Amino acid sequence: MLSVERFDIAGREVWIGVIHSEKIQGITFSLEREQFESNIARLLGFLRRREVRVEAERGKSQYPSLVMEVITGELDNEVLIPMLAFEGVTPFERRVYEWLTKNVKRGSVITYGSLAKALGTSPRAIGGAMKRNPYPIVVPCHRVVARDGIGYYTPRLDEKMFLLEIEGVEGWTGSKLTS
């Protein structure tokens, strides 16, 4: 099932979509409705390529509100880990996602290199796991930055900047890689 809701957060319209069955299979969001619909299609395709059985039928659930509460700081990311299905993710990706969610808290960031060192892998492998993260916001890939700037974000950098600003990490949002 796909649950979709629109929220007003910090003066911005934020669309949140959660694909779920018994647990959350994937999350997407956007600051623009048209981009949001594209994000849903991309997430559904990604999950299906990874052989996750997903339904795109729309229906209500509490999940979009819970994700919104993570964005606004009313709920800690780690609280939602047991609600994630982790279907279609590799053991490596799951290890990265769980470590990141448990160790890099709201208001802080970590570099790709530091995260790689903590997990005994390469920054490139971390970057790949972040790009494939099916649980953005809950698994805070937006908190992973390059050593010399904000880094990248799929699908749009302005969304990473929005999330970091909401969390009070403004020092990174003015870096040279944001222009």
Image: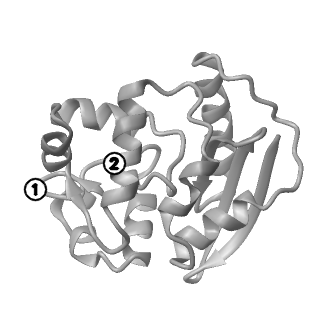
Which quadrant is the N terminus positioned in? top right
For the C terminus, give its image quadrant: bottom left
Q: Considering the numbered disc 2 on the image, is that residue within a helix, a strand or a loop?
A: helix
What residue would you read off at disc 2? 99
- Disc 1: which residue: 148
Using the image, determine if residue 25 lies above or below residue 46: below
**Residue 119, position as x, y percentages in the image:** 21, 39
Picture coordinates of residue 75 (x, y %)? 56, 73
Asked if residue 153 can be seen in this view, the reply is no
Above or below: residue 73 compared with residue 114: below
Percent position of residue 101, x then y: 40, 55
| SS type, badge 1 | loop
In this view of the protein, which residue sits in the foreground, 95 or 147? 95
Q: What residue is at 20 percent from the left and 47 percent from the top?
A: 115
Q: Residue at x 54, y 77 (%)?
A: 72
Residue at x 51%, y 77% (from the top left corner) = 73
Q: Is residue 140 left or right of residue 10?
A: left
Three-letter residue code for mark 2 = Trp
Q: Residues within 10 Å of mark 1 (few under 14, many from 20)?
A: few
Report whether 175 appears left or right of 108.
Answer: left
Q: Amino acid at mark 1?
A: Asp
The numbered disc on residue 127 is: none
Q: Quadrant of residue 54?
A: top right
Taking the image as drawn, is residue 167 in sight? yes
Farthest front residue in view: 82
Camera-nearest residue between 137 and 151: 137
Total marks shown come to 2
Q: Residue at x 12, y 42 (%)?
A: 117
User: Which of the two discs, 2 and 1, sits closer to the camera?
Assistant: 2
* Front one among 179 and 4: 4
Pointer 2 local density, CA inside 10 Å: few below 14, some 14–19, many at least 20? some
